[in-house]
Image: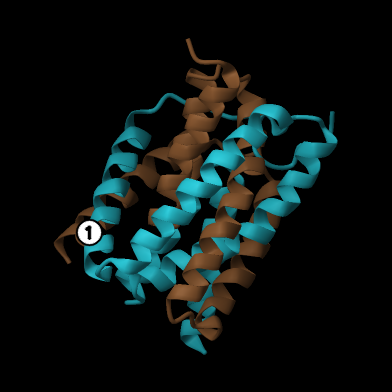
Chain colours: A cyan, B brown
């Protein structure tokens, strides 16, 4: 039960971060593998799955506000669907420890860019990835 | 010179590689490319990246579910928490300074990443 509540809270906190565009997913994976001792593919699979409903709600408001460049986005989807299928096959075929180490290197790089990135003090609600319900 | 469509396709391909291999981080690759290379307006880039990443996640999630021993019971609390957090985060978006958050986030990623490499 305690584990369940911790997992719920971890999902909640990283969910809030994701909504603010602070890449909560990679942090959630680190938590699942590093703190909870879950294996890398399960953690990655959970994160992928959890992004589906979460982003769907954001997408509805973006579509309503006509914020999506559909033509260009569809080009990206077509190419990305192929590469993501191939890289998923690769990641699930490799030794999980190897994937974990490569993932570690990836997040260290992301972490360094986050430390030095320029960002505005506060963003207006109409600028971001979520809650664009008002015009 | 590449057309915008070709650039967008290449940006999507790069995001796909990251998204599938790491199960995360596709947007972190995609958004800067859409803004800096495809020259998309910042708001449109954020919104379009959600539109692009969603189907990519669906494809990757299907592969992970089919090819790994997926434990739905262990996944469930994270999924419920994430959904609630995403909803709350969306409601209070813009009311919190994100600069400090990005710095803390960066430090946590570096610590967690180094531990993962050393594991």
> For this rendering, which residue is in front, A120 or B31?
B31
Residue drawn at (58%, 18%), measured in percent from left and top? Answer: B4
Residue drawn at (69%, 42%), measured in percent from left and top? Answer: A130
Residue drawn at (58%, 35%), measured in percent from left and top? Answer: A76
Residue B49 in view (yes/no): yes
Place of residue B28 in the rendered image (x, y in percent of width and height, measured from the top left): 46, 39
In this view, B119 is above or below B56: below
Q: Secondary structure at mark 1?
A: helix
From the image, which quarter does the C terminus of chain B lie in? bottom left
Place of residue B60 in the rendered image (x, y in percent of width and height, measured from the top left): 51, 59
In this view, B77 is above or below A74: below
Residue drawn at (66%, 57%), measured in percent from left and top? Answer: A54
Place of residue B55 in the rendered image (x, y in percent of width and height, measured from the top left): 63, 51
Residue to which mark 1 is pinned: A101
Apparent side of residue B55 relative to residue A113 in the rendered image (left or right): right
> For this rendering, which residue is in front, B45 or A81?
A81
Q: Residues within 10 Å of mark 1 (few under 14, many from 20)?
A: some
Which chain letter matches label 1? Answer: A
Place of residue B116 in the rendered image (x, y in percent of width and height, measured from the top left): 23, 61
């Amino acid at each position: 039960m305690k584990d369940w509540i911790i997992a719920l809270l971890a999902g909640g906190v990283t969910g809030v971060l994701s909504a603010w565009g602070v890449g909560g997913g990679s942090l959630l994976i680190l938590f699942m593998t590093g703190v909870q001792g879950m294996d890398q593919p399960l953690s990655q699979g959970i994160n992928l799955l959890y992004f589906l409903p979460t982003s769907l709600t954001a997408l509805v408001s973006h579509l309503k506000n006509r914020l999506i460049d559909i033509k260009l986005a569809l080009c990206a989807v077509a190419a990305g669907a192929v590469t993501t299928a191939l890289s998923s096959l690769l990641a699930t075929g490799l030794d999980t420890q190897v994937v974990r180490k490569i993932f570690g290197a990836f997040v260290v790089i992301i972490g360094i860019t986050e430390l030095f990135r320029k960002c505005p003090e506060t963003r207006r609600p109409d600028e971001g990835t979520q809650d664009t319900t008002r015009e | 010179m590449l057309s915008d469509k070709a650039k967008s396709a290449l940006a999507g391909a790069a995001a796909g590689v990251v998204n599938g291999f790491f199960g995360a981080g596709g947007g972190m690759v995609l958004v800067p490319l859409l803004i800096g290379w495809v020259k998309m307006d910042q708001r449109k880039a954020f919104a379009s990246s959600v539109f692009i990443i969603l189907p990519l996640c669906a494809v990757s999630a299907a592969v992970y579910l089919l090819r790994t021993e997926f434990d739905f019971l262990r996944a469930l609390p994270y999924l419920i928490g994430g959904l609630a957090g995403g909803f709350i985060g969306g409601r209070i978006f813009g009311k919190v300074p994100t600069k400090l958050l990005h710095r803390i986030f960066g430090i946590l990623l570096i610590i967690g990443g180094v531990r993962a490499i050393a594991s």
